[in-house]
Image (tube, coloured by chain):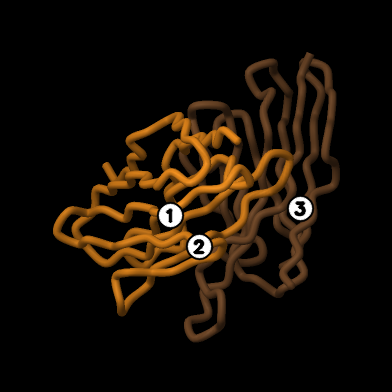
Amino acid sequence: DVKVTQSSRYLVKRTGEKVFLECVQDMDHENMFWYRQDPGLGLRLIYFSYDVKMKEKGDIPEGYSVSREKKERFSLILESASTNQTSMYLCASSSSRSGLAGAHEQYFGPGTRLTVT
Amino acid sequence: AQSVSQHNHHVILSEAASLELGCNYSYGGTVNLFWYVQYPGQHLQLLLKYFSGDPLVKGIKGFEAEFIKSKFSFNLRKPSVQWSDTAEYFCAVIMGRDDKIIFGKGTRLHILP
C-alpha cells in the first residue's frame, strides 16, 4: 500500500514565522506535489517536482518555496507566514512509469491544517 | 486555459436516490480522467479512473463514470446512494503528457438518512 505521510496534522504559527511542512512517500514515486485546499476553491497546485532537486511552479507559488533533496521527501516552506496562508495543505505523489499499476494516479497524505495568527 | 468544471457545488439527496455529478474539461488532446472522494475527516482517495479503452468505467462502492469525448465530459454516477456516500467529490484531469493533474472545485454531496 502506498503511504504518504505529512509531518503534522495541525499546526499553529504566528505571522512572519518561517514554516516547514514535510512530506514523505514510501513507494519510490518520481513525482511529488503540494496543494492547498480551501472551501469552494478545490485543490490548487502550489509546487511540484518530477525528480530530486527539480521543482516546478504550480498555479499559486507566491509566498512558498520547496525543497526535494531526497526522492522520498518533499518539503514546503512558507518563508514568512501570513494569515492568508491559513489553509489545509495536501501532499501527493505519483509515478510516471507506464505499465505500473497505479501509474499517474496521485496518492494523497492526510493533510496539514495550518493556522496563521 | 486548461480547466476542469464541476457543475454542482452542493448536492443534497435522500438515500436510494440516483446520483449524477457533472464534470467537463477544456482540452482537445489526450486526457486521463479521475474522480477522487474525500470522506469527512479522511484524506483524498481515488474513486475511479479512465486512461483508455471502454469509456464506461466502474469504480469502488458502486460508482461508475462515462467518458464522452465529444462532450469533453466525465460524469460520475451511482444508481442508489447511501448515507455513507456523504463526502466531497473531485473530478481531475491530466491533459496531454504531463503528470500534473488539474482538479475541479469539488462537489459536496450530502445524503439524508
Residue highlighted by disc 2: B62
Residue visible at 38% across and 72% down in the picture: B51
As shown in the figure, which amino acid type bears the numbered disc 2? Gly
Q: Residue at x 66, y 24 (%)?
A: A85
Task: Indicate the quadrant where residue B64 lies.
Answer: bottom left
Chain identifier, colour brown:
A
The front one of A69 and A103 is A103
Query: Which residue is disc 3 drawn over?
Result: A23
Q: CA distance from mark 3 to mark 1?
A: 34 Å
Query: Disc 1: which chain?
Result: B
SS state under label 2: helix
Name which residue lies at 70% across and 74% down.
A28
Based on the displayed image, in which of its 4 quarters is residue A68 positioned? bottom right
SS for callout 1: strand
Q: Amino acid at mark 1?
A: Lys
Question: Relative to residue A15, is residue A63 depicted above or below?
Answer: below
Sequence-first disc among 2 and 1: 2
| Circle 3 residues within 10 Å: few <14, some 14–19, many ≥20 | many
- Disc 2 to disc 1, C-alpha distance: 6 Å
Please give the label number shown on residue B78. 1
Q: Which secondary structure lies at badge 3?
A: strand
In the visual, does A60 lie left or right of B74? Answer: right
Q: Residues within 10 Å of mark 2 (few under 14, many from 20)?
A: few
Q: Is residue A53 above or below residue B87?
A: below
Chain in orange colour? B
Measured along the vertical axis of the image, is residue B54 above or below residue A53?
Answer: below
The Cα–Cα distance between marks 2 and 3, rounded to whole angstroms, is: 32 Å
Q: Residue at x 72, y 69 (%)?
A: A2
Kind of residue at disc 3: Cys
Q: Is residue A50 left or right of residue B3?
A: right
